[in-house]
Amino acid sequence: MDENPCIICVAITGSVPRKEDNPNLPVSIDEQIESTQEAFEAGATIVHCHVRNDDQTVSSDPDRFERLKLGIEKHCKGMVIQFSTGGRSGKGKERGGMLSICPEMASLTVGSNNFPSRVYENPPELIDWLSSEMNKYSIQPEIEAFDLSHIFQAAEMYHDGRLKGKPYIQFVMGVKNAMPVDRDVFEFYLKTIKRILPTANWCGAGIGKYQKIVNEWCIELGGHTRTGLEDNIRLNKQTLAPSNAALVSLTKEICDKYNRPVADWIQTRNILGIPTDRRQNSNSYV
Ligand code: ZN
């Protein structure tokens, strides 16, 4: 039976929203662990992680990443932990300073584009360094495609061996000054992936008010999807999201609408090509 389960990734905190925007945003490590556990129980099986300092400013402190990882491993059996190497959390190689902690996944952007108020800089030598670190520590990348050229760049890197593992590409749409949320472009992204990187799994993330519509397109067209307070702090126009779990539940409802079962952690690992028993072998497992 071909039931094609949908993986829900939850991006719990990010580097932009603050508690002033939504008091339910998890910021401290304890809050992040608790919020991840609720989201996991609601159906999310990948957690995308950034860490913050006590004053909510962004951090790339490996020690904080390690505490978060240990807490999630302890409370969310089998959940795949993905660290962000995004450009808002540090400068240059700081962005990959925590990869030696060996999360099973990490996000990777393979080209530059504009962000709301600056350039999101991803120079080729930094991309090559981040990908080599991911290879060194057997970390599966999730490619964040903010532009069509990023999909071509990722394909080239998989083909020449700079990227390893089963390709997993995320279309990010709706960031101001980057790719807008556009159905034709979304379908063209998908068609392009199927043509130049046919073994890839794919997912999508919509920012702000576009989160739900991108979730819906991904689920409808057979992909995986991302939700969470990093990308969107609202349940709807009038209401702030009470939790990451509430956004996961909303995504699950869309899966029900399209008869897509939500992937459990074993299915998620099988789809991604990540071993189901890796935790037991991990040095940091507690
Ligand atoms: Zn992120």
Image (spheres, rainbow, N blue to C red):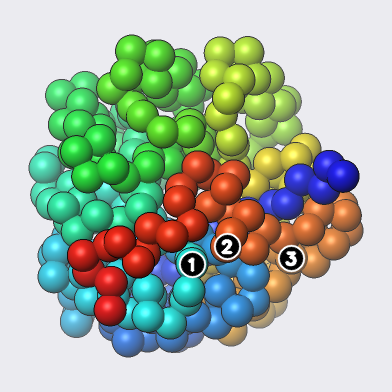
Q: Position of residue 121 (x, y in %)?
A: 24, 33
Q: Name the residue under label 3.
A: 252
Q: Can residue 198 be seen in this view?
A: yes
Q: Where is residue 75 in the image (x, y as percent from the top left)?
A: 43, 82
Q: Does the residue labelled 2 lie within 8 Å of ligand 1?
A: no
At label 3, counting other C-alpha atoms closer than 10 Å, the crowd grade (few under 14, some 14-19, many 20 or more) is many
Q: In which quarter of the image is residue 128?
A: top left
**What residue is shown at x 53% (from left), y 44% (from top)?**
272
Q: Which amino acid does label 3 sit on?
A: Lys
Left or right: 139 as drawn, with respect to 91:
right
* Dot 1: element: loop
Q: Quadrant of residue 83?
A: bottom left
Q: What residue type is labelled 2?
A: Trp
Q: Mark 1 points at which residue?
A: 78
At label 1, counting other C-alpha atoms closer than 10 Å, the crowd grade (few under 14, some 14-19, many 20 or more) is many
Q: Do the residues labelled 1 and 2 touch (CB within 8 Å)?
A: yes
**What residue is shown at x 58% (from left), y 84% (from top)?**
242
Q: Which of 2 and 181 is in front in this view?
A: 2
- Report the disc number at residue 265: 2
**What residue is shown at x 40% (from left), y 68% (from top)?**
13
**What residue is shown at x 32% (from left), y 86% (from top)?**
30
